[in-house]
Amino acid sequence: MAMKRCRMIAGFVALGITTTVGAAGLGAGIGDEPKVAPRADGPMPSAKARSEGPGNSLAGELDHLKAQYEDAVWARSAPPPASATSKGDRADPAGIAPDYPGVVRRIFDLAATAPKDPAVRDAMLWIIEKAQNGSETLNPGEFALAASWLVRHHGDDPDAVRVGLRLDNWQTANRDHLLLGFYASAKGRESKGLARLALAQYLERKAMMAERSKKVEGRPAYVHDDFVRVDGTRYSQKEVMPDEEYAYLLHLKQCDVNYLRAESERLYEEVIADYSDVPYVTTRDRLLEALLRQPEPKWGGEPLTDEGRRKIEARIASHRSTLGRVAEARLDDWHNLAVGKLAPEIQGIDVYGNPLKLADYRGKVVAAVFWGTWCGPCMQQIPREKELVGRMKNRPFAMLGVNADADAGVARKVMEAQGITWPNWHDGEPGTGPIAQLYHVRSYPTVYVIDAEGKIRAKDAHGLALDQLVEKLVAEQEAAGR
């Protein structure tokens, strides 16, 4: 069984939490109650065994552990071969789950022999990066251990601190500890700049979550709505919010929202004043650079192709910036893309090559959806978006898409197959197109709701919250027009 997505109900929907999708994932989730592979946390090898082991070094052993785990993940998720026709020929969909906690324990055993070694740092960053793909909620203890290790032994290392630049997509006690720890331990100019920008981004998001948490009553529940049985059928499962998550929700309720926002803004301004020229390079970009340096790099469990290499190189190049420019964009987002501000005008070309302007929809409520065919959560939203468009037929409403596929032809093909009839700008690569940059889009899907006067009424509204807000604004516009 594999959980691909969870939807929050019973009040927690008010927090508006969505899935952040990067252009390059570095891991995979682990299903429920799988068969367990042999444990990776056996006794430490002798010096002789280590000298004869893979890589013949600490770095080699750590890389071997990580590679074994990644290969096992990809092998487990790979489709059965075309020749497998009978049930006996096909692999059990549950498969043998890689022993992630065991791998982490073995990493810590090796790390204890040289805690400040760069190879140990990189192994800890590998553990942290798994959080971007969901394993932090499955294995919070491993994340916490790696976070403490990084702060204690690598807190002034820019290549450790930069991991915080991508941790603002979710708020947890472990992330609080890591980012505040980096802020306290960073001493060098580059490390201090990275720590301040990372914390500013995190506190900005935390302030928003704290504000929304105050509207939540009681203990929320989740509905996991995309479980898959061995026979391929789907089913849903409801569960109460786990204790650790509920405890953090209670913490958010106690936070001073105004203080968090003021501190975030202060940190952005400090970055602009004192660290503006420091290069902005994320840990994920560093990992991709390291991948390209490998003699036989793999991507998705397969040898990296020349086309794949070019795409990775283009992705790395597209992210090049400075801390100052990123901080300025965040403040611009804060001050000029805030709820109540006029939405910036969009003029561009749609996926069919025709001119498309936002101004042409003044007088209607607009839901502007930033999406891509490569984005799983974006594709999952399409049926609900179609239902919304259907309900709003002949009413003052328009759904407009901003597509982030490099090839407009790919977008057209998917739109036609999915029955997407509303206009879509073609904005190119995710996060780098002119419209995404104008609106500072950092995750997909992102949805802006714009009222009939052209003012932003919500950012990142999804699901029931989007439906309810659109109905409210459309009804107001209809009443005003009578």
Image: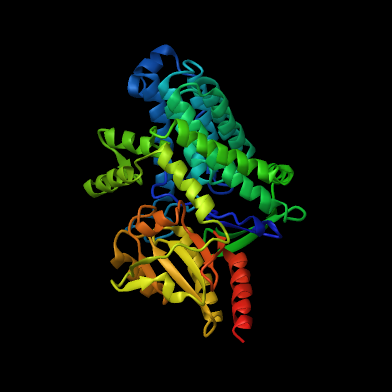
Where 451 falls versus 97 (above or below)? below
Q: Quadrant of residue 117?
A: top left
Q: What percent of the width, then of the height, locates residue 222?
A: 66, 56
Up the image or down, 52 lies above or below 395; here it is above
Q: From what the image shows, is residue 338 above or below residue 61?
A: below
Q: How many marks?
A: 0
Q: Which residue is at a point 63% across and 46% down the rendered structure image?
A: 207
Q: Residue at x 36, y 19 (%)?
A: 57
Position of residue 72 measured from the top left corner of the image (x, y, whole percent):
42, 41
Q: Is residue 246 left or right of residue 128?
A: right
Q: Nearer the viewer, residue 410 or 472?
A: 472
Question: Which quarter shows the C terminus?
Answer: bottom right
Looking at the image, which is closer to me, 76 or 258? Answer: 258
* In-image side of 428 versus 241 (left or right): left
Give the quarter of the image for residue 395. bottom right
Where in the figure is residue 155, as x and y percent of width and height?
51, 24
